[in-house]
Image (spheres, rainbow, N blue to C red):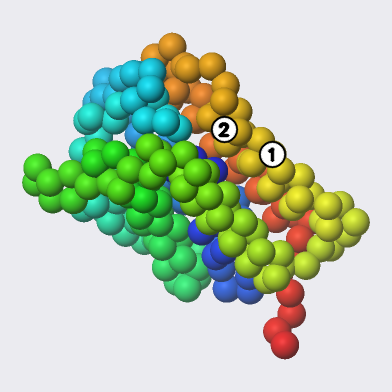
Amino acid sequence: MFVGHYGPALALAGGRKGPSLAVACVAVQLVDFAWSGALLAGIEHARVVPGFTALSPLDLYDMPYTHALASAFAWAAGAALLYGVVTRAWVAAALVGVCVISHWLLDWVVHKPDLILWGDVKVGLGLWDAPAAGVAAEFGVLALGFVAYMTRTAPKSRLGAVAPWAFFALLAAMAVINWLGPTPPDSAAVAMSALAVYVLTAVLAAGLDRVRTARPAG
Ligand SMILES: [Zn+2]
């Protein structure tokens, strides 16, 4: 999955006890940050195969350290522990862990069976090969998170009222560009552009954190 990963971030961030949206946006893509680095370092492997699935040309044949279920739990536990030790906000820390693990679950919905469940067993429901369902899942999860975020947070200013819509529109546009744009030349190009998108999204989320606040109780 791509921008749909931001659904859980939007759903869990910005409230009175949750992490900031910026932290949540990094958390939901944490294993993909690691995956991009592992690809560039030659630790994990993928190849671009035009038409590999209807919505993604990536053959993700080797990613044991970032996208196995056990490793996803390890990344989640590590992130939650680090966040908790630094902030002492353990509810938010647990939500950071949930954000990290959500990545594997959403990837499981759309990927071909390339996610290690255990040992040699690889799983994936493959919605990327059912374009209508894949697109619906991507936007559906993102939209649900957006509604939750807008319900739980309130604007501090006029900018705070408008900015989330721009954020949502930009994510949707990046998804469409990803699906309809040119096929990337190789997996390194995919890793670099993924990193750029994830960093940009986190920076914009930090901007949203400044212009919106948790709604008061009741
Ligand atoms: Zn992933």
Crowd tier of the residue under label 2, counting other residues whose Cα lies within 10 Å: few below 14, some 14–19, many 20 or above:
some
Residue 111 visible in the displayed image: yes
Which residue occupies 70% across, 70% down? 151
- Is the residue indicated by label 2 positioned so its CB lies within 8 Å of ligand 1? no
- Say whether marks 2 and 1 touch (CB < 8 Å): no
Side of 98 where 45 appears, left or right = left
Q: Position of residue 177 (x, y in %)?
A: 60, 28
Tell which residue pokes out farthest to the bottom in this image: 218
Amino acid type of the residue that numbered disc 1 sits on in the rendered structure: Leu
Residue 196 visible in the displayed image: no
- Residue to which mark 1 is pinned: 170
**Mark toward the start of the polypeptide (2 vs 1):** 1
Work out how far the residue at label 2 is from the one at label 1, CA to CA, in angstroms: 11 Å
Q: Position of residue 168 (x, y in %)?
A: 69, 48
Side of 35 where 89 appears, left or right = right
Tell which residue pokes out farthest to the right in this image: 158
**Residue 197 marker:** 2
Amino acid type of the residue that numbered disc 2 sits on in the rendered structure: Val
Where the N terminus falls, by quadrant?
top left
